[in-house]
Amino acid sequence: MQKIDWEIIYRKVNGSISKQDEIKLENWLQGSESHRDYYQKVIQFYEKSEEELQEVPDHLDQFISRLQTKRRRLFIDRVQSYAAVIMLPLLVATGVFLKSTIEKNEQLAKLTKSQLEMPVIKNQAVLITSNGETHELKADEFLQINDQSGVVIRRNNESGLKYENIASVANEQLAYNTLKTAKGGEYQLELADGTMVHLNCDSELKYPVAFGADERRVQLKGEAYFDVRKNGKPFIVQVDDMAVKVLGTKFNVMAYQDEESVQTTLVSGKVRVFVNAEGKSESLDLSPGKQSGWNKSLGILSSREVDVNLYTSWVDGYFRFENQKLEDLMKTISRWYDVKILYQQSALKGKRLTGKLYRFDNFSVITEMIEKISGVKIEHTEQTILISNK
Amino acid sequence: MQRINEKILLKGIEDRNQSSFRLLYETYHAPLFRFAESYVCCPGIAEDIVQDVFIKMWEERIGSINRSLKAYLFSMVRNRCIDYLRTVKVEDKRKLKLMEALVLSDSVDLSLDEGITRQIKKAIEELPDQCKEVYKMSVYDGLKHAEIAEELDISIDSVKVQVFRAKKGLRKKLMHLRELLLLFSSIYKWRKN
């Protein structure tokens, strides 16, 4: 269904519509009941006098009481989610199955007020457009950038960045944008083909503003979750000498440079992972629930079955880990909270942990939780964490 | 519109202070509602949109914002209006709807969109002299009708008439000057490149 330009409706209301536009309007009206309803509203709106347009409903008191009930509910939700976050690691660590709510409440009572405070969501990134301009992106700000070639980039509340007004272009004319997140930041964007990308912290995605005629290729550093829109052309995520090729599917690619291997985790659909390094060229097909690992220094491309949630829960705001080394968990956490990790004894790095932490918690809540489940002592100054034996 | 200290107000909202929230609502509800109503052409939907924005202000701690609170609130409302129009497959290509909403909510001093701000400024300059003067004092300087009346030594009623005339004139101008607008937007594009 074609969209209609509001100006056409306006011209109709004002009696200055052209024959051609009249047909467009008619088509749009035929399109849906909701369109006809909306048209009626427009007519009513323009029938209002200037005085009537000054009228504003006043529901302040009702509204305040509504907020208060909402607030109570929210508070309860929050307490419950904290309870889950605390309980899960405790259960695993102690092996005790605590059923009664009394015991839960005891655990909750130990939380101080500051720990119940909601953390600020860090939704921010930097966008570098094809002409080299840099734009800082912050949460909830309206932004519109006109890139060369008439493409409009809109910052949207729900979905982050969005590319509009796009026609596909010849390969040699591809204009690239780069989206960068800092430590502690994350960002979502919708590419020209409708593919959604959730970029994790300390990561970088380079992509064409409009895709070429035969393939869709983007370059990734760090970590991102892709929900690729099917359109017949292959979608390729390039990570140095490795590439993931798909048609339409959901998957996560983790390619931080300080990690041993590049992990590609498939949620649904089908992907093929290609490696084209010095003296080595191979590929591997993944089915849902599988994860491939490309270890560059060893030159090994392998795959294994995994619990997909462990690798994609960051998209929903959690750190999830199962029998994971303390060192690996702390690496993830340091990227998000932008801290350096030091170990008093390197043997501590190998401790295995299981649990779930809420990514938007205050840092002190996170460290306290880790102390509890791992039995190590964590001290931190502003930018550094020291981990030692208790 | 009342002149208030935004920082203190934001801090109060962050601390979930009810009177801060009342002040926020009393200050911004009416202009936001008028803006949304003109944007979506429906008072019911407009009220839903504005309430949604206030709820968001209450539930999510905004912390600090690096521009005016007013601009922040209006762009949240604006985004929701655009989203609504999208559901009925209407697009506001030349942003006429946005311009009309800005005029009808007495918010032409906001710069949500650079190109539109220029067009509105230009249209204001073309208003008759006294009308223009009164309107600018009212909208850009935020003066009350009585203050303008005193300053210019005219009656409050004639201030009201001039403001009314200015709004009506602007609406007409902005919605009909197709050729001028096109010329303007091409100059704008050219300048950007």
Image (tube, helix red, strand yellow):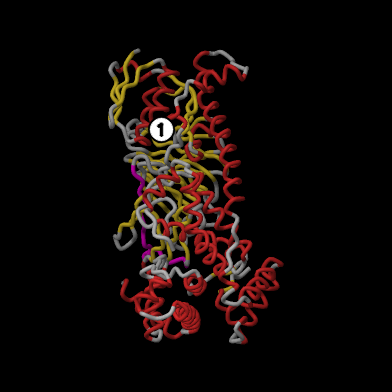
First to last magenta residue range? A166-182
- Image quarter for residue B47? bottom right
Residue at 54 percent across and 49 percent down: it is B55
**Mark 1 = which residue?**
A362
Give the SS element for disc 1: loop
Residue B100 or residue A49, whichever sits in front? A49
Residue type for callout 1: Asn
B142 vs A47, nearest the viewer: B142
Q: Quadrant of the C terminus of chain A?
A: top left
Q: Quick check: is A167 in the magenta stretch? A: yes
Q: Is residue A65 above or below residue A298?
A: below
Looking at the image, is A90 positioned above or below residue A65? above
Can you give x and y, in whole percent of width and height, for residue A283 in the image?
Answer: 45, 41
- Is A373 in front, or is B69? B69
Whether residue A50 is in magenta: the answer is no
Q: Position of residue A67 (x, y in %)?
A: 57, 45
Please provide percent x and percent y for residue A364. 38, 28
Label 1 resides on the chain identified as A
Percent across and percent down for residue B154 are 40, 81
Dot 1: few (<14), some (14–19), or many (≥20) neighbours within 10 Å? some
Q: Is residue A215 visible?
A: no
Taking the image as drawn, is residue A389 in sight? yes
Relative side of A83 to A112, left or right:
right
Quadrant for residue B49, please give it: bottom right
